[in-house]
Image: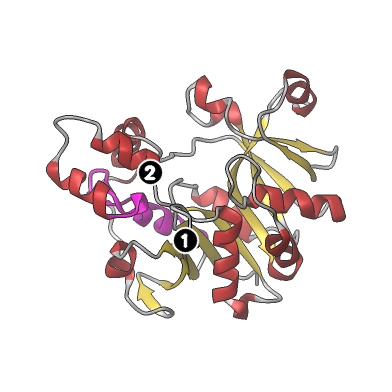
Amino acid sequence: MNDPTLMILAGGVSSRMKRSLLSRVGLDPKLMNEAQSKSKAMLTIGEGKRPFLDYLLLNAREAGYEDVLIVISEKDTSIREYYGAKEMGNEFNGLRISYAVQRIPAGRTKPLGTADAVLQGMNGRQDWQGRKFTVCNGDNLYSRKALLTLLESRYPNAMIDYDREALGFDESRILKFAITQKDDEGFLTAIIEKPTDKEIERSKGKNGTIGVSMNIFRLDYNDAIPYILAVPLHPIREEKELPTAISMMLQQHPRSVYAFPLAERVPDMTSIDDFVTVGDYLSKEFGKFAW
């Protein structure tokens, strides 16, 4: 049986979403208050007015995950108030939920990035050593199919390689996503940020698709930890990023990450415009779901 372990990164400060929400006139006062006080993963949305994170956790449970670690911000209390206050062992509708805190270092106003979030999570769950876990963002809604594909993966390390034309985003956003390059057998060879036209052309699959990363991976704890520890700060964003750690692992161990192709929508919570369109999508797909 594969390890039913999932790490959700929900420790970001969500500054873009909050700025866009607070800049709009005439919004629901409850939503305005949530935007100021909660992680964006906890903003209530959809017909059932549930936290966005509920929908991801439902998909995870239905895919077969049981042990969920949520990496949270030191400034946010909304996740613990909703899913349970204990550091480990909170029972929530068939899931066991635990937490790791991503603290903001002195002299900074934001966390150190996704690789640092994963490191804090791995430090908090050292009982996962020798095991595999799926890791994903808390502000994207990954499908049951995507989550199940990684849970059932026979590869030590893997990712979902999304067809960028199927994501449901406008072109201006799609062009900002990092593209993937694979070998003929489907193993990841590179994750490229801000690719050139030539790199995009070389990245096309046999059917002309261009794959992108939406930051969902299946990692072997022991394989990944040396690169999570060693990843440097990005020279411009000054954050430690998970794709950089993956690239470092590929340089040392080619063919160590398999890329599963998938063409489907990935609802994403970045701005107020996303809040409206994602809310409509959730109402249609989930309605007032019951656990």
Closer to the chain start, of discs 2 and 1, is: 2
Q: Can residue 253 be seen by looking at this rendering?
A: no
Report the amino acid beneath label 1: Ile
Dots 2, 1 in contact, CB < 8 A = no
> Which mark is on residue 139?
none
Vertical position of residue 40 compared to residue 202: above or below: below
Vertical position of residue 94 compared to residue 215: above or below: below
Residue marked by disc 2: 15
Residues 34 and 6: in front is 34
The spot of residue 156 in percent (x, y) is 75, 62
The spot of residue 10 in percent (x, y) is 44, 57
Residue marked by disc 1: 104
- Identify the colour scheme used: secondary structure
User: Over which residues does the magenta segment extend?
Assistant: 38-64
Q: Can residue 145 be seen by looking at this rendering?
A: yes
Q: Quadrant of the N terminus?
A: bottom right
CA distance separating discs 2 and 1:
14 Å
Report the amino acid beneath label 2: Ser
Vertical position of residue 147 compared to residue 262: above or below: below
- Image point 68% across, 61% down: which residue? 228
Mark 2 crowd level (few <14, some 14–19, many ≥20, 10 Å Cα): some
The spot of residue 280 in percent (x, y) is 30, 35
- Image point 47% across, 61% down: which residue? 104
Q: Quadrant of the C terminus?
A: bottom left
Magenta stretch containing residue 54, yes or no? yes
